[in-house]
Amino acid sequence: MATDLQSPFKQSVPIDLPNTDKIHIAIVVSKWNASITENLYNGAIKTLSESGIPHSNITRYNVPGSFELIYGCKIAQLKRVQVVIAIGSVIRGETPHFHYICQAVSLGIKDLNVLGKVPIIFCVLTDDTIKQAKERSGGKLGNKGIEAARAAIEIAQFNDIAQKK
Ligand code: DLZ
């Protein structure tokens, strides 16, 4: 499937880049579908830790649902962090609610990336079923939390290099 073919971050191996101990990260976690978001969070934390980021450099913020990730990330961007990870899981129900939440969260986080100085990694699963969400949060299709952590380290390093040029 496309995810397997295209993601450069799929493998659960530590990322080998210098000065990762200097990176401070905020992780904003939605409580909706908590069994999924906790697995994503744990995948991210494990990868960050294995890549040399001290636990004390990572701050977690909880928000009620994915819609509130936008506000949570806006606040997190104001802290002393180089990168923010937004973790959520939206699962399609019987009403158009799914569409509105997914659109608002993706565009809201996009706007924060455009306007803010701190990049935000989008780790929000948007699945038709809970089974699909499980497969992507530590199941047979991997863990998107791992991929998000790797992307977070890469973009923090990108900024570090870009600011020195
Ligand atoms: C209301 C709602 C629904 C129906 N589904 C989800 C979901 O699948 N995933 C999620 O993260 N949040 C959901 N929410 C809650 C909204 O994100 C938000 O918290 C509420 O609408 C309150 O603003």
Image (cartoon, rainbow, N blue to C red):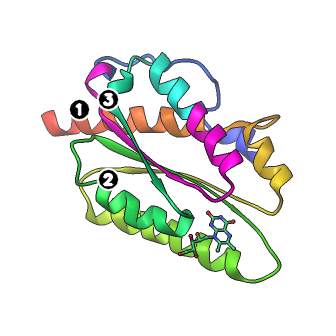
| Residue that badge 3 annotates | 57
Q: Is residue 9 visible?
A: no
Q: Quadrant of ligand 1?
A: bottom right
Q: Which mark is residue 44?
A: none
Start-end of magenta stretch: 21-42
**Residue at left 32%, top 64%?**
114
Residue 49 screen position, x and y as percent: 46, 21
On the picture, is 80 further left or further right than 140? left
Per the image, the residue denoted by label 1 is 161
Residue type at numbered disc 3:
Asn
Q: Report the side of 164 relative to 153 (left or right).
A: left
Inspect this view and state whether residue 50 appears: yes
Instruction: Please state the horizontal and vertical placement of residue 110, each as a whole percent of the image.
Output: 42, 64
Residue at the far left: name it.
164
**Which mark sits nearer the N-terminus, 3 or 1?**
3
Binning the other alpha carbons within 10 Å of mark 1 as few (below 14), some (14 to 19) or many (20 upward) gives few
Residue at left 52%, top 75%? 104
Q: CA distance from mark 1 to mark 2?
A: 22 Å
**What residue lies at 53% left-to-right and 63% top-to-bottom?**
64
Foreground of the two, 2 or 93: 93
**Ligand 1 closer than 8 Å to label 2 CB:** no
Element type at marker 3? helix
